[in-house]
Structure formats: structure tokens, C-alpha cells
Amino acid sequence: MPGMAASSRIFEKIHLSEELFEFYYLEWLTPIDQENLTDYTARIAKNIHHENPVLIGVSFGGIIVQELMKIMTTRKTIIISSVRSNQEYPLKMKWAKTTKIYKLFPTNWLSQIEGTLVKFGSEKQKKKINLYQQYLSIRDPKYLDWAFENVIKWNRNQADPSIIHIHGDQDEVFPIQNIHQAIIVKGGTHAMIIYKHHWFNKNLSNIILYDTYEQLD
């Protein structure tokens, strides 16, 4: 399950043995009016047709796969650049929930800034926008409003110890100092599923297949 506003293309650089694994990619659905996270996740679950799957979710997708665990049996659940409970949120996200300031967040500003940078920005900025357009392709304001609110309001306050958590020590969205009991990827940012794909190609198979493994490099 990809991260917020992202398509499954974020996994395109992850290459594991096709003799050992079958890959199925979930995509974001357009939320129904006033749809809560539980009902939304139930609709996502209808696209999972295998018993006892291994679920992997990135960022908000990591929250979705944890919600899926409530309604299906999984062999293993792995989250990347995410959190196992709202206790791992940074202070600004906790503050946003308390004050409800997230309701004032204008999600359509993303497209406006993007257009300005493409027209007037530096070459470096334009390259970043090109990557943004490539991987973060979901721009529907209805979805973005829903997703942002449901991340902030996620009510899990106790981590499930069975969940395997992979996290970068340079994550700018969920800072590493708030994260507990994770496999740490050195130099990994919030977008490390793309930029640290070599690490995942080297280590993810063993994380999926085995219950114990040595410290990973």
C-alpha cells in the first residue's frame, strides 16, 4: 500500500525473487462522503484476494495495513516510513489534532505551488517537481482532505508488537526520536522506498521470510 497521494509506482524499483514472491499492488480509492477509516479500509480489503498475505504499507499506507489487520489474518505486516501508534507522532501533529487546525489546511495549494515552480522555479526545483508528479499522482482534493484528516485523527494509541517497522534515521515527517523498536535505515528519509531501493532489494526478502535476522546494513 503506497503512501498518501502516491500510486503504487513508488515500488517500481523494488525487485525481489519472482520465484519466492507474488506481488499485488493496492491503490487509493476515492473516499465516500463522511467515510471513516474503518469503512474505507474495508473497501480496500475487497481488493485482497489471498489468504494470510504479507502486507506492506508506506507512510499513511502503513496505517492502512494496520487497520487491515483488524479484519483479516496476515502472515506478517511490515510498515515503512510510518508509525505503529499515534504516540509516535511528532508534536506538531498532536497539536494539529488538539486544535483541529488541520481543517483549515488548503489541500489545493499543492497544485498551485507546483504550477508556479514549474514555470518560474530553478532547475533543481523543477526536477523535484517532476519526481513529485511521477510518484505523487493523486491530486483529488476530496481524497487529500480525507487522508490528511484521517492521519491526524488516527486513534491507535498502543503499538502492536507483531508489526515490523522499517524507518529511516533522517525521516522528516516522522522523526526518528519518536520511533520505537524499528529496523533503522541509515540516511533514510521519508521517501526512502524510492531513494534507498538498493537497501530494500538487499534486505526485504529476509525480513519477509524469517522471524529473526541480524542487524541490517
Image: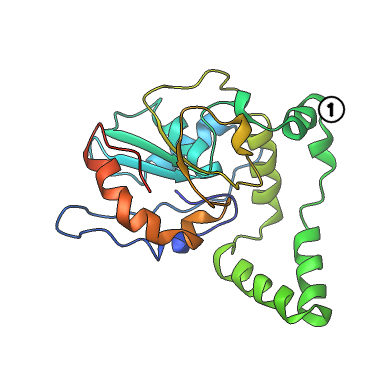
**In the picture shown, does residue 192 fall above or below 185?**
below
Q: Image point 61% across, 28% down: which residue?
A: 88
Name which quarter of the figure residue 122 lies in: bottom right
Residue type, mark 1 in image: Thr
**In the picture shown, does residue 120 fall above or below 199?**
below
Q: Nearer the viewer, residue 90 or 7?
A: 90
Q: Where in the figure is residue 133, as x and y percent of width and height?
A: 62, 70
Q: Where in the figure is residue 129, as x and y percent of width and height?
A: 68, 71
Q: Image point 41% across, 51% down: which residue?
A: 26
**In the picture shown, does residue 74 fall above or below 138?**
above
Q: Where in the figure is residue 159, as x and y percent of width and height?
A: 49, 22
Q: Is residue 134 left or right of residue 212?
A: right
Q: Residues within 10 Å of mark 1 (few under 14, many from 20)?
A: few
| Residue at the top extreme, as displayed | 158
Q: Nearer the viewer, residue 189 or 162?
A: 189
Q: Nearer the viewer, residue 157 or 168?
A: 168
Q: Image point 36% across, 35% down: which residue?
A: 77
